Image (spheres, rainbow, N blue to C red):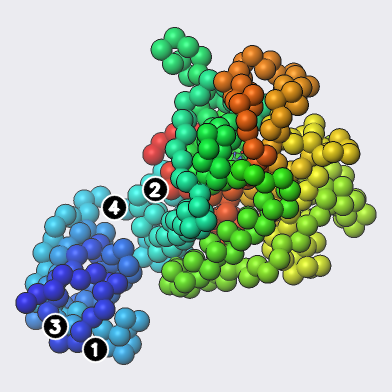
Amino acid sequence: MIRIVTTETPYKVGETVKLSGWVHKQRYLSKVTFLLLRDRGGIIQCILEKEWLNFRVENESIVEIIGDVVESKKQKLGVEIHVRNIRVINKCQKAIPFEINQSELKAGMDHLLNHRTISLRHEKNQAIFKIQSVLSQSFGDFFTSHGFTRIFTPKIVSQGAEGGANVFSLNYFGKNAHLAQSPQFYKQMMVASGFERVFEIGQVFRAEAHHSSRHLNEYVSLDVEIGFIDDVKEIMEWETDVLKYMISRVNDQCKRELEILDVKLPFITEIPCLTLYEAQEILSSQYQKASPEGDLDSEGERLIGEYVREKYNSEFVFITNYPCETRPMYTMPSNDSALTESFDLLYKGLEITSGGLRIHDYEMLLQSFSSKGLNPNDFASYIEMFQYGVPPHGGFAIGLERLTANMTGVGNIRGATAFPRDLERLIP
Ligand code: AMO
């Protein structure tokens, strides 16, 4: 009997198998042709001799092979396939725009993104997106196992949830609507609806005209919101715990991918914490670097990343106690200062998370919106719920592409996005 297999299937020497995939590379010698077949799990060497010796097909064509499994100590899989029959299922008809059977893709980012289906076939890209898949899956698994409900909130909304004007507008049957900047209001509304603990994995949209290696106009936000919580440190502990879990899952499930990328993941014990004021002081005294009012800029984040790596041997650092002015209108102010109960998390000197406690008091919220120059009436359906009994709550959101890019050593966030949307790019 012929068993249908992939490169991931354990092979039994001596059996006859059928496998399908892409022709990765071919090498012709006088008495043998070597054909490397690639599928989702990797590459296997196939040997063509005798009547198949002169078989030729363009690389990247799709073929189906029936052959015998033969032990081969030189091969990574420990076996190779001696071909009995090979059938071309779909020929690659056009010269591919760049070689993908080399260890590195040698083309500029734009060219690679213009031909994304081809560049994604490269084993390093396959590895990046498999790791990303495990990151999002493990994020969901962690919170599901802690009593959280997965939610799906609308992406067509009437108001931006993050303050600021970076919203995409659209005509919604004659009404002015926006693409959601984040599920912020809705995740809070789900807590208030009695679910208490919720998470969401979904696309969000930011109309930011940035030309940068860290900004996308559409990205995946890993959002969490937790009811009955009144200390911002608890939220930071949740984030620390989920990151530990996500890293352990990638270590367990992506051994091959980590090897392909030559990446070792960080080991988190405890994440150090600096107040924004402390971080700005360190930048000023040790790096002679001025910071923007109430915030860090990207260079400041990078330098703080270096500082904590040296001082605490940590790739992560929480930055806390941001002032009200630089945080969104829903952020809980601290009792005794003009600061807030909020934080950012930097990973290798790049912000990957914002989070904090939220205002749950109706009057305080009205005042916060007004103080930011926002008309509470424009946000009535959100603000109204705070009159109906809302528990103290807080949460955070991780940018999936930033996390993946940093973890896999991709310098540009586009490399961790299958089909990025940026200032210029709307296709593919
Ligand atoms: P914030 O706006 O800081 O907070 O976003 C949270 C995280 O999302 C990622 N991110 C981005 N990634 C790619 N391109 C962008 N343009 C972009 N903008 C943000 C970052 C960032 O840390 N509602 C709050 C979260 C909360 O408090 O729960 C929010 O969206 O990794």
Q: Quadrant of the N terminus?
A: bottom left
The residue to which callout 3 is attached is 15
Q: Position of residue 26 (x, y in %)?
A: 26, 71
Residue 71's tag is 1
- Within-10-Å neighbours for mark 1: few <14, some 14–19, many 20+: some
Q: Would you say the beta carbon of the disc 4 residue lies within 8 angstroms of ligand 1?
A: no
Q: Marks 1 and 4, Cα distance to the nearest angstrom?
A: 34 Å
For residue 188, above or below residue 128: above
- Identify which residue is drawn at 76% across, 51% down: 319
Q: Marks 3 and 1, Cα distance to the nearest angstrom?
A: 11 Å
Are the residues flagged by discs 2 and 3 in contact, CB closer than 8 Å? no
- Within-10-Å neighbours for mark 4: few <14, some 14–19, many 20+: few
Secondary structure, mark 1, is strand
Which of the two labelled residues, at mark 1 and mark 4, occupies the earlier sequence position?
Answer: 1
Q: Marks 1 and 2, Cα distance to the nearest angstrom?
A: 36 Å
Side of 39 relative to 220 (left or right): left
Place residue 355 in its image quadrant: top right
Which of the two labelled residues, at mark 2 and mark 4, occupies the earlier sequence position?
Answer: 4
| Kind of residue at disc 4 | Ala
